[in-house]
Each structure stands twice: as C-alpha cells, then as structure tokens.
Amino acid sequence: METHPTHTFGPLTVTIDRTLCIGSGNCVNLAPGVFRLDEQNLVTFTDAPEPDALDTLIEACAVCPVAALIVTDEDGRQIVP
Ligand code: SF4
C-alpha cells in the first residue's frame, strides 16, 4: 500500500498521509464514499471514491485530528490543513 495515495475530485486533490493516520475514523464518518479504513485500521480511498459534495469532502479532511488529509485546489494552493 502506498504511503501517500492521491485522488483528484474536480478542482480538488486529496492526498492521504498514511504515516500520520491513527485510524480515528472521523473522515470515514463524514465521507464514507471517499474514505475507508483498511485491515491495518489506516485510512485509504474507497475503490471508486465519490464525495457527496466538495464542501463535505473538505470538511471530512479538516476534521482529521492529526492532519493526515491534505487538500489542494486547482492552483496548487493548500486548503487543508
Ligand atoms: S480522520 Fe485522520 S486519523 Fe482519522 S481515520 Fe481519517 S485520516 Fe486517519
């Protein structure tokens, strides 16, 4: 498993830093269509990641207690954390 998987959602790019994830599940609760916990209890993308809405996706990344979810916009600016 990659340590920093990345996925693009329209204008947003989400990168997971699996080296930081503590498996709290906060992001999974808010965006179960995008994130899941794997057999190591670390977050990864679902097989076909699809957010309900981009603002929900941003919120799901922002609630991570260890800043393991990085969001950048189409200009490469970091939005989260
Ligand atoms: S909220 Fe952060 S620590 Fe919790 S499962 Fe998601 S990425 Fe891991």
Image: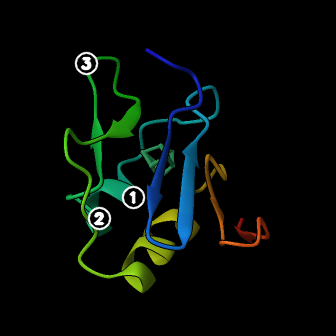
| Residue pointed to by mark 1 | 27
Residues at discs 2 and 3 in contact (Cβ within 8 Å)? no
Percent position of residue 25, x then y: 35, 49
Q: How is the image coloured?
A: rainbow
Vertical comparison of 65 with 30: above or below: above
Q: Is the CB atom of the residue marked by disc 3 within 8 angstroms of ligand 1's nearest atom? A: no
Q: Amino acid at mark 3?
A: Glu
Residue drawn at x 72%, y 65% is 81
Residue 39 — which label?
3
The amino acid type found where label 1 is placed reads Cys
Q: Residue at x 20, y 47 (%)?
A: 48
Distance (Cα) linking label 1 and label 2: 6 Å
Say which quadrant the N terminus sits in: top left
Q: Is residue 46 left or right of residue 7?
A: left
Check if mark 1's residue and mark 3's residue have beta carbons within 8 Å. Answer: no
Q: Residue 55 in the image: x percent, y percent? A: 44, 85
First in sequence: mark 1 or mark 3?
1
Vertical arrangement, residue 47 with respect to residue 8, above or below:
above
Disc 2 crowd, CA 10 A, few/some/many (<14, 14-19, 20+) = many
Q: Are marks 1 and 2 in contact (CB under 8 Å)?
A: yes
**Tag 3, which secondary structure?**
loop
Q: Quadrant of residue 31?
A: bottom left
Q: Badge 3 local density, few (<14 within 10 Å), some, or many (20+)?
A: few
Can you tell which quarter of the image residue 36 is in?
Answer: top left
Identify the mark at residue 31; answer none if there is no mark: 2
The disc at residue 76 is none
Amino acid found under the numbered disc labelled 2: Ala
Q: Residues within 10 Å of mark 1 (few under 14, many from 20)?
A: many
Q: Look at discs 2 and 3 and give the one toward the viewer.
A: 2
Ligand 1 within 8 angstroms of badge 1 C-beta: yes
Circle 2 SS class = loop
Tag 1 secondary structure: helix
